[in-house]
């Protein structure tokens, strides 16, 4: 078993003060930075790319950066994110023409690789590539926006993913993304997750001049 990680999603951060926001959540106890990449094609929103990842590194962020690709096609952006300082790169299998190749490409670029499952995407995509993933990310909302409600059916899916990981004996993180709050994180953890993305729960709640605000929210998680 691996230690639990809190992964603030910078989608809900103040982009005009991004470096400071990331520094503050890490100082408050967050473990990794969740970096949502949306292309207005695979998902209906447009966010940030490798330049911003590189800018966070130049700002002095040393924590792992967890790049969640919601883009199509997948492969051509992977080397750019690896060079920009990504640690994890995850993608949606529906967005890749060759899932096995994309997973191998991520590892060959020196990053940890993961698959992301939308609420209606079956875990059977893992069947033949389990040994090529370092992270399984279950979406508990439909991707594209922060601030949506946790879809309860994801709890059963987490238990199924946990069974698959334990049966494999492999070192694979199980990450959950969407609608995670201080008041549901305990049942999400009990269902098997070990890595918790939280966007609005951390940044919107702490939209305050007081950086200590982050501590109190992250400490409840
Ligand atoms: C949604 C993103 C999430 C999002 C989560 O497509 O993948 O990471 O920022 O936001 P909250 O925690 O507000 O549901
Ligand atoms: Zn995400």
Image (cartoon, rainbow, N blue to C red):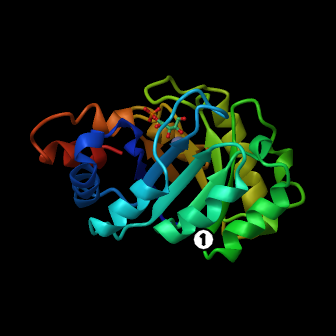
Question: Is residue 22 visible to the viewer in this orientation of the structure?
Answer: yes
Q: Nearer the viewer, residue 85 or 40?
A: 40
160 is higher (above) or lower (below) than 102: above
Q: Nearer the viewer, residue 152 or 78?
A: 78
Quadrant hosting residue 217: top left
Task: Point out residue 137 in the picture as x, y percentages from the top left corner.
Answer: 63, 48
Determine whether the residue tagged by mark 1 lies in a helix, strand or loop: loop
Image quadrant in which the N terminus is located: bottom right
Farthest left residue? Answer: 210
- The structure residue drawn at horizontal position 45% and vertical position 39%, both measured from the top left corner, is 185
- The structure residue drawn at horizontal position 85% and vertical position 55%, both measured from the top left corner, is 98
- How crowded pointer 1 is (Cα within 10 Å; few <14, some 14-19, many 20+) is rated as many
- The structure residue drawn at horizontal position 56% and vertical position 49%, both measured from the top left corner, is 68
Q: Nearer the viewer, residue 1 or 133?
A: 133
Task: Point out residue 16 in the picture as x, y percentages from the top left corner.
Answer: 24, 41
Q: Is residue 194 left or right of residue 170?
A: left
Question: Is residue 182 visible to the viewer in this orientation of the structure?
Answer: no
Task: Point out residue 146 in the picture as x, y percentages from the top left corner.
Answer: 45, 30
**Label 1 CB sits under 8 Å from any ligand 2 atom:** no
- The structure residue drawn at horizontal position 31% and vertical position 40%, both measured from the top left corner, is 13
85 is higher (above) or lower (below) than 29: below
Question: How many numbered circles does the render carry?
Answer: 1
Image quadrant in which the C terminus is located: top left
Q: Label 1 belongs to which residue?
A: 111
Q: Nearer the viewer, residue 219 or 74?
A: 74
């Amino acid at each position: 078993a691996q230690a639990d990680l809190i992964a603030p999603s910078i989608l809900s951060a103040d982009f005009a003060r991004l470096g400071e926001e990331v520094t503050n959540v890490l100082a408050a106890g967050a473990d990794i930075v969740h970096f949502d990449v949306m292309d207005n094609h695979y998902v209906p929103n447009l966010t940030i790319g490798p330049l911003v990842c590189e800018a966070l590194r130049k700002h002095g962020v040393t924590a792992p950066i967890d790049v969640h690709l919601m883009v199509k096609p997948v492969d051509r952006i992977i080397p750019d994110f690896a060079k920009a300082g990504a640690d994890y790169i995850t993608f949606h299998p529906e967005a890749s023409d060759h899932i096995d190749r994309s997973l191998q490409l991520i590892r060959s670029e020196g990053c940890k690789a993961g698959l992301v499952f939308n609420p209606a995407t079956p875990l059977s995509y893992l069947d033949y590539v389990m040994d090529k993933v370092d992270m399984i990310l279950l979406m508990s909302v439909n991707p594209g926006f922060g601030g949506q409600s946790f879809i309860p059916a994801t709890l059963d899916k987490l238990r199924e993913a946990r069974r698959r990981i334990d049966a494999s004996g492999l070192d694979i993180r199980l990450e959950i993304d969407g609608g995670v709050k201080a008041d549901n994180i305990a049942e999400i953890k009990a269902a098997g997750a070990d890595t918790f993305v939280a966007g609005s729960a951390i940044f919107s709640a702490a939209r305050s001049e007081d950086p200590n605000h982050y501590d109190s929210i992250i400490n409840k998680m």
